[in-house]
Image (cartoon, grey):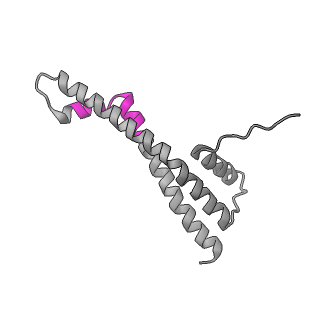
Amino acid sequence: MTEKIAEKITIDVILNSLKEAVESKKAQFDAEFWISAATKINLLLGDDHDFLFQAEQEFMRKVDEYYKEMDKPSMARAKDRAKTTEEWLKYKQQEARVRRAEEFIKICKARARVAQGF
């Protein structure tokens, strides 16, 4: 007996499935689809917010590290220097990811209203 292992639902899985449907021109969705997608993403977004907070904290630790190394401390210079690090990149990528998910939720709500004829 073969059991199919279900793929864990993540924001990426939801968005990638939608992207594939759009790319293959099979993007006809009803109101239920849009509400379901928004609900799932909203539920999963908490983990992404947590990761964003952690990434911001790591970035700020790097700023603090650079600030403490300076002969003439300058927070602006420390932040500029820290913006060249992997911590900054991770923080900004996560921030953009959260914004995209939040925007997608808004789009889902609007599409659901349109699909229902409101």
Q: Is residue 85 magenta?
A: yes
Count of number-bearing discs: 0
Magenta span of residues = 78-93
Along the viewing direction, whichever of 34 and 43 lies nearer the viewer: 43
Along the viewing direction, whichever of 26 and 62 lies nearer the viewer: 62
Residue 81 on image: x %, y %: 26, 29
Residue 17 on image: x %, y %: 67, 48
Which residue is at a point 29% across and 34% down the rendered structure image? 60
Query: From the viewer's perspective, is residue 100 above or below residue 86?
Result: below
Residue 66, located in which quarter of the rendered image?
Answer: top left
Residue 54, located in which quarter of the rendered image?
Answer: top left
Q: Does residue 48 appear anywhere in the picture?
A: yes
In the displayed structure image, the side of residue 60 where residue 24 appears, left or right: right
Screen quadrant of the N terminus: top right
Residue 51, located in which quarter of the rendered image?
Answer: top left
Along the viewing direction, whichever of 6 and 97 lies nearer the viewer: 6
Q: Does residue 97 appear anywhere in the picture?
A: no
Screen quadrant of the C terminus: bottom right
Query: From the viewer's perspective, is residue 34 above or below residue 65?
Result: below
Along the viewing direction, whichever of 80 and 54 lies nearer the viewer: 54
Residue 39 on image: x %, y %: 58, 57
Q: Is residue 23 magenta?
A: no
In the displayed structure image, the side of residue 34 where residue 84 appears, left or right: left
Which residue in the rendered view is the most extreme toward the left?
72
Residue 88 on image: x %, y %: 36, 34
Chief SS of the magenta region: helix
Which residue is at a point 33% across and 35% down the rendered structure image? 57
Query: From the viewer's perspective, is residue 34 above or below residue 101?
Result: below
Which residue is at a point 63% across and 59% down the rendered structure image? 36
